[in-house]
Amino acid sequence: MVGRVLFYVQHLQGVGHVHRAAHVANALAGSGLDVLLVSGGMPVPGLSLAGPTLYQLPPMFARAGNFKDLVTDAGLPIDLSWKGARRDELVRLAMEYRPNVVVTEAFPFGRRQLSFELLPLLEAMTAMTPRPVVVASVRDILQEGRKQERITETLETLNRFFDRVLVHGDPTFARLEETFPRADGIACTVHYSGLVSGPPPSAGGRPARTQGEVLVSAGGGATRGERLLLAALDARPLTSVRDLTWRLLLGPNLPGVEVELLRQRSEKGVVIENNRSDFRELLAGCALSVSQAGYNTVCDILRASCRSVLIPYADLGETEQTFRAARMYEAGLAQMVKEDELSPIALAAAIDAAMLAESGNATLDLDGAAQSARLITGWLAAA
């Protein structure tokens, strides 16, 4: 019998969660498992799946800057009727699929808004015979400053339903207990997969790094990406690399008015275009990367071994990207400009400092997708 894995993921604003889930799902399918990737967010153009089946739940997302303001793909507020219909669809799907393994991405460490459907799903899976192995898939760095009652709620859910916690990180870089202070209260076992990076960039046709471009990116663009891109345009004439080509990549969630402003302010030597599927190849050939500090982007930077400047998103009390960028800076792997200190002068100084630094290969484990597949396959075999 081929093992069946139901992998649930919900992205609310940025698309990093679903891309990381896709990398792991691809590795699981490559190991011979039947994988059903269930996505509850907006469809993601260009999502690379090789083997898993994608099931799209009725989409919902969070309005920019407010994770509590959930709306449908038509922009209508989520109500009890809508929640009930999607909950029933998810549970019915799982009961028909009868997975041997259930993976929830982020939950219960995050995505509390999805409890309306995930708790019924977990209850149904717990009652199933044979009971599937239940795994919490979580990135290495969590949002800090959460209320104690929420941490207690997370532990209660973990210890009631979950068999394993799979942390997608290298413990030499960041450990779960650093941003989840009551990790010693987790009853099930905690495992580290390594960082989940995409496949290595193609070696063919890379330009020499010293002759490359300055690559400026802001992920999906939903999290203040326009501020970074505009600051880069203003910083360009102040840097030692002003004569290089600067390529600015526009995320799909960047507001149209900001896109128009960027195009109006561009000048000779600046290329402005939409996000590209060959982003990792661009990183491998660039002279310098300027970006936010999201999980996927930093993993791609580490994989490409390129010089980089990180401007972590820190609006509305967000701490995760700042923690990651600081660790990269402390390890000598990137320069950092805090979001509240971002200015053309500060960014230009960081860019020049990065260009003077040696770029080299990090020793961090980037094999997280394959290792996740090996771990889950082993748990399935043991069960």
Image (tube, rainbow, N blue to C red):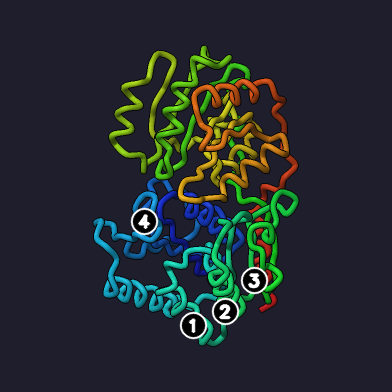
x 40%, y 44%: residue: 222
Tag 3–tag 2 contact (CB < 8 Å):
no
Q: Residues within 10 Å of mark 2 (few under 14, many from 20)?
A: some
x 38%, y 78%: residue: 92
Res 3 visible: no
Check the picture and name the quadrant holding the N terminus. bottom right
Tag 4–tag 1 contact (CB < 8 Å):
no
Check the picture and name the quadrant holding the C terminus. bottom right
Q: CA distance from mark 2 to mark 1?
A: 8 Å
The three-letter amino acid code for the residue at tag 1 is Glu
Q: Which residue is mark 4?
A: 62
The three-letter amino acid code for the residue at tag 3 is Arg
142 over 79 or under it: above or below: above
The three-letter amino acid code for the residue at tag 2 is Phe
Tag 3–tag 4 contact (CB < 8 Å):
no
Name the mark nearer the viewer: 4 or 2. Answer: 4
* Residue 69, horizontal then vertical, whole percent: 34, 59
Q: Residues within 10 Å of mark 4 (few under 14, many from 20)?
A: some
* Residue 324, horizontal then vertical, whole percent: 62, 45
Element type where label 3 sits in the image? strand
Tag 2–tag 1 contact (CB < 8 Å):
yes
Q: Which residue is mark 2?
A: 161
Q: Mark number for residue 164? A: 3
Res 51 visible: yes
Looking at the image, residue 130 sits to the left or right of residue 92; the answer is right
The three-letter amino acid code for the residue at tag 4 is Ala
First in sequence: mark 4 vs mark 2:
4
Q: CA distance from mark 4 to mark 2?
A: 27 Å
Q: Mark number for residue 123? A: 1
First in sequence: mark 3 vs mark 1:
1
